[in-house]
Amino acid sequence: MDHTITCERERVLIIGAAGRDFHNFNVYFRGNPKYEVVCFTATQIPKIEGRCYPPSLSGHLYPAGIPIFPETELEKLVKLHRVQRCVLSYSDLNNQTVMNIANRVMTAGADFGLLGPENTWLRSRKPVIAVTAVRTGCGKSQTSRYVAKLLRDAGLNPVAVRHPMPYGDLAKQAVQRFTSYEDLEKHEVTLEEREEYEMHIAKGTTVYAGVDYAAILRDAEKEADVVIWDGGNNDFPFYAPDLWICVADPFRAGHEELYYPGSVNFRRAQVIVINKANSAPKDQVDRVIAAAKRLNPTAKIVLGISEVNADDPAKITGKAVLCIDDGPTLTHGEMPFGAGKIACEKYKAGKIVDPRPYAVGSLKAVLEKWKHLEWAGSGLTLPAMGYYAEQLKDLKDTIEATPCDTVLVATPMDLNRLLHLNKTFVNVTYELVDGEGLKLSEPVNAWIKSIKH
């Protein structure tokens, strides 16, 4: 008599956006015979659905890979594939949106779930500093650069591992290492990836990114004294941090309780950096300080200044300026303006030009979708969108068609190097500098001292 007990694998759908979803699969589901991941869904980033998570990454239980469908088909997919559980695996969502997705899932007949840090962390043999945020566009990258400089000043070699942005061939993008502009070309990165990598490279920090963050960590550990987890959106770290920093934005005071999973970062970090304290209204800075003391009373609170500088201010003063700002910050990050507006105020621009009448193709659709970009009648910024070749062309055509004296490039990458603009342009940079009170260097240097002894 056969007493073999067979257990049917739980059928799982991972709801994602080409980042956290793949990591959750790799760490929690891949190779786990209890589960069968039938598909991924994708949203937030254009043209990332319709692909397949390849067999080279999906493991022996998935010899044909795993299909990726649009999130708009969620209910249909749950019914078609007899899905038993959906796992939400992307970030920068307000709490209401999280519950709306849960309601959609349960209405379709499946359970809904989330995976927390402890179930998805990888542990490094090297010390890890994680830089995370409450929302997209708080200033994680400038904070990571600040931390990298402190490590170099202490005689340590930092390596930055960036949250994934694999929007191309996933198998080819499994492990990527960047030390030069030539590496950016070799890996055919998008404009959005350049925004995250270029400044690190310019300052001599090696950057890793990709899809398989266990393999990435093994490579990064070979050359790093300290690994900097350079977070994306408002996601929590993929690597277990020894020092956890969360950056908050007082222009979006209150979001530290309203957005998933940024609220996790805010509540768990050992250091909270309230950035832009020099330009945000004081009452909003005070609101974030109060929230930090209430929600994370043991965290050290640092006031940071996001210092905005132009390489040629004369091209701004008194001029008609078209502002180009970081795309994710302005779109799903929901900021109504970026560093371009701050630079225009600092250097007394004559006016900010509205690009809406001149926007073409996908850029026109972006401006129509994200209505919050209007600045109460004072103009509009243009998000630097370039997820695919046609969108890059739309961006260039929109810039070229907009009448202005100066194109103010306030996105953190060399846009002219990519687009070869036929207009006068000025580059704006922004770096974290210390504000009043506790300096970020104090807790970071204390931590560095602790790992050296």
Image (cartoon, rainbow, N blue to C red):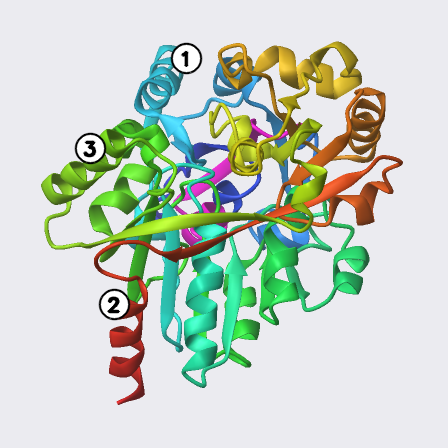
Residue topped by disc 2: 443
Q: Is residue 41 magenta?
A: yes
- Secondary structure category for the residue under label 1: helix
User: Image quadrant for the C terminus?
Assistant: bottom left
**Which mark's residue is nearer the viewer, 1 or 2?**
2
- Secondary structure category for the residue under label 3: helix
Residue topped by disc 1: 108
Pick whichever of labels 1 and 2 is earlier in the sequence. Answer: 1
Label pair 3/2, CB-CB below 8 angstroms:
no
| Mark 3–mark 2 distance (CA, rounded to whole Å) | 23 Å
- Secondary structure category for the residue under label 2: helix
Give percent across and percent down for residue 439.
28, 62
Please tell me which residue lies in front, 57 or 139: 139
Q: Is residue 429 visible?
A: yes
Tag 1: amino acid: Ala
Residue topped by disc 3: 287
Q: On the rendered structure, is 383 left or right of 261?
A: right
Question: Residue 145's mark?
Answer: none
Q: Is residue 176 above or below residue 158?
A: above
Determine the residue positioned at 59% across, 62% down.
Answer: 200
Tag 3: amino acid: Arg
Give percent across and percent down for residue 114.
33, 36
Label pair 1/2, CB-CB below 8 angstroms:
no
Instruction: Characterize the local packing of mark 3: few (<14), some (14-19) or many (20 or more) Cα atoms within 10 angstroms.
Output: few
